[in-house]
Image (cartoon, rainbow, N blue to C red):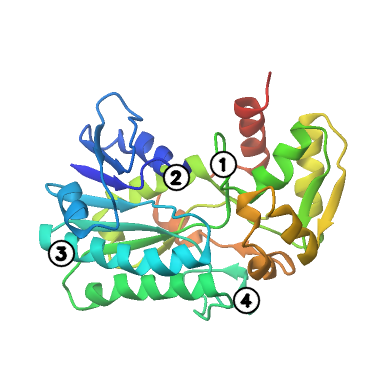
């Protein structure tokens, strides 16, 4: 049995699809889980309840964490450390391997151009401090030999079928589909990597089912040579058959947009990711595994064909 905690989000769904290549025994866990594959087992659970987490993962060989708590600092502070402790303790108790899907918020803001698994940990935001804390929580029992685990990190992500959790969808694809201006934070002239969600799902499944991948951090496969903000805008506009109109979202505008777009409400402290080059390096993964990374243009076209073709 391979179990996904937080199975209903963009990554959890793609991961469930990808795991079919390895097993027919897949358990999907969330408050209201829904099958992705016909043979999936669904298990409703409150993931902040230790007993429920233990019951959810019992009998599993591998536990994947793709939980996405609401993008709110207070909720993160209350939920992430508690949830992570529950999962670690339950995995140790039930002898499960742990695969934790992560982001890059803990990285030093002065080292975002060419991020690798060795990039210095120095979180510049309150959300980043939480991510650094839970990564330390996971790796501590790994170093003690009590737990087999790996951390799979993604850049900001984009992909088909994402609802409310992709900056690129909310600020570019959706406005263009409604004949409105795109919004881009801070500045247009900096490069910005995005990880394609189907690639992230396939790669996370591959890591989980590779014995050599454990007890370390991996960057999930992400296309090289990312577009600048302006190039993202122009490319998406061209593919959608619209004009590349854009307004730069200053801190004030971002706060205003947060009144209407939930994911934007807590973005002011994260704007540093857009006022410098944000380039994600995944060569450790691509050097180790035979994997075709989706080019940006192909990913853009897949999103348009999936979500915006009438």
Q: Which of the labelled discs sits on residue 88, or is there none?
A: none
Mark 1: few, some, or many residues within 10 Å (few <14, many ≥20)? some
Q: Is residue 224 visible?
A: no
Percent from the top left, x then y, of residue 298? 64, 36
**Front residue of 52 and 281:** 52
Query: How many numbered marks, from 0 up?
Result: 4
Q: Which residue in the structure is indicated by mark 3?
A: 92
Residue displayed at 12% across by 59% down: 95
Quadrant of the image occupied by residue 236:
top right
Mark 3 lies on a secondary structure that is: helix
Q: Residue at x 19, y 66 (%)?
A: 89
The quadrant in which the N terminus is found is top left
In primary-sequence order, the first of circles 3 and 2 is 2
Is disc 4 surrounded by few (<14), some (14 to 19) or many (20+) residues within 10 Å?
some
Q: CA distance from mark 4 to mark 1?
A: 27 Å
The residue labelled by disc 2 is 11
Residue under numbered circle 4: 109
- Position above or below: 103 against 197: below
Q: Identify the residue position indicated by label 1 in the image.
A: 294
Is the C-beta separation of discs 4 and 1 under 8 Å? no
Name the residue rendered at 48%, 54% in the picture. Answer: 70
């Amino acid at each position: 049995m391979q179990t996904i905690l937080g199975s209903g989000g963009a990554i959890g769904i793609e991961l469930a699809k990808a795991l079919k290549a390895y097993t027919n025994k897949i358990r999907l866990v969330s408050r209201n889980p829904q099958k992705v594959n016909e043979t999936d087992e669904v298990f409703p659970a409150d993931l902040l309840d230790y007993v429920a987490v233990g019951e959810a993962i019992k009998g599993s060989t591998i536990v994947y964490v793709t939980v996405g708590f609401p993008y709110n600092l207070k909720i993160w502070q209350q939920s992430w450390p508690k949830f992570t402790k529950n999962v670690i303790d339950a995995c140790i108790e039930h002898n499960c391997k742990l695969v934790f899907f992560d982001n890059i918020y803990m990285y030093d803001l002065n080292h975002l151009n060419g991020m690798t698994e060795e990039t210095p940990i120095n979180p510049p935001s309150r959300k980043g401090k939480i991510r650094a804390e839970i990564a330390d929580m996971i790796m501590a029992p790994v170093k003690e030999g009590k737990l087999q685990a790996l951390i799979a990190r993604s850049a900001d992500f984009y992909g088909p079928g994402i609802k409310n959790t992709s900056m690129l969808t909310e600020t570019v694809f959706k406005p263009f589909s409604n004949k409105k201006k795109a919004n881009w934070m801070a500045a247009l002239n900096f490069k910005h990597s995005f990880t394609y969600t189907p690639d992230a799902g396939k790669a996370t499944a591959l890591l989980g089912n590779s014995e050599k991948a454990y007890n370390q951090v991996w960057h999930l496969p992400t296309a090289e040579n990312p577009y600048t903000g302006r190039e993202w805008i122009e490319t998406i506009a061209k593919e959608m058959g619209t004009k590349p109109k854009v307004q730069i979202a200053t801190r004030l505008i971002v706060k205003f947009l947060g009144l209407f777009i939930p994911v934007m409400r807590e973005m002011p402290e994260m704007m540093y990711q857009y006022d410098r080059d944000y380039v994600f390096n995944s060569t450790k993964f691509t050097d180790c595994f035979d994997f075709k990374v989706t080019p940006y243009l192909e990913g853009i076209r897949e999103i348009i064909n999936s979500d915006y073709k009438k």
